Image: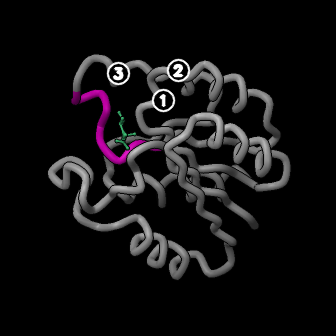
Amino acid sequence: MKIQIINGPNLNLLGVREPGIYGSSSFESYLDTLRKRYPDVEIAYYQSNVEGELIDKLQEVGFEADGVVLNAGAYTHTSIALQDCIRSLKAPVVEVHISNVHKREEFRHKSMISCACMGVIAGFGLDSYRLAIEAIIAAQ
Ligand code: DQA
């Protein structure tokens, strides 16, 4: 089974960026833990700060992966291009947020991509990614 994790803008700074909100662990070290927990799942990882590159990656993996875990960062709240892309794919996409976006500023309450995703997980810290993987496994 192959699951692709895709992180959007500023998520390369996890561990450094606003640790009070996003925690103090880097994504790379969390990824190690995740891969050890799911030895039978091939977990691929990609991060970009560029909207078009996220779309390119989704198009590349979205017809062969068993599922995609997507934290689109701030593009979540703005990107119709990502919504259109997710709609075009074969693989189910789970929208993930580390923070509970509904507890935060109002502009974070609206997602442009939720309507195209299999589901949304938000507010469980990095564990949100594990919960998304569980959801993809359960949907197989
Ligand atoms: C985020 C929430 C977004 O509002 C924000 O722009 C991010 C991270 C999260 O994981 O909590 O970059 O997606």
Sequence-earlier tag: 1 or 3: 1
Judge from the rendering whether residue 109 lies leftward or rightward of residue 54; answer left or right.
left
Label 2 residue SS: loop
Instruction: Examine the rendered structure and indicate whether residue 34 appears above or below residue 116.
Output: below
Q: Position of residue 91 (x, y in %)?
A: 76, 44
Label 1 vs label 3, nearer the camera = 1
Q: How much space separates mark 1 and mark 3, taking CA atoms?
A: 10 Å
- Going by the numbered disc 1, the residue's amino acid type is Thr
The quarter holding residue 133 reads bottom right
Q: Which quadrant of the figure contains the C terminus?
A: bottom right
Secondary element at image label 1: helix
Q: Which residue is mark 2?
A: 112
Tell me the residue at 31%/32% (across/down).
101
- Name the foreground residue: 30 vs 119: 30
Marks 2 and 1 sit apart, C-alpha to C-alpha, by 6 Å
Q: Which residue is mark 3?
A: 109
Crowding near the residue tagged with mark 1, few <14, some 14–19, many ≥20 C-alpha atoms within 10 Å = many
Q: Position of residue 119 (x, y in %)?
A: 56, 36
Name the residue rendered at 54%, 27% in the picture. Answer: 114
The image quadrant where one finds ligand 1 is top left
Q: Quadrant of the N terminus?
A: bottom right
- Give how far across and how far down residue 90 sits, in percent: 82, 40
Mark 2 burial class by Cα count in 10 Å: few <14, some 14-19, many 20+: some
- Residue ID for mark 1: 76
What is the spatial separation of the Cα atoms under label 3 and label 2, in whole angstroms? 10 Å
Residue 13 drawn at (x, y percent): 34, 56
Residue at 43% x, 38% y: name it.
Answer: 73
* Residue at screen point 38% across, 59% down: 127
- The earlier-in-sequence mark between 2 and 1 is 1
The region drawn magenta spans: 96-104
**Callouts 2 and 1 close, C-beta under 8 Å:** yes
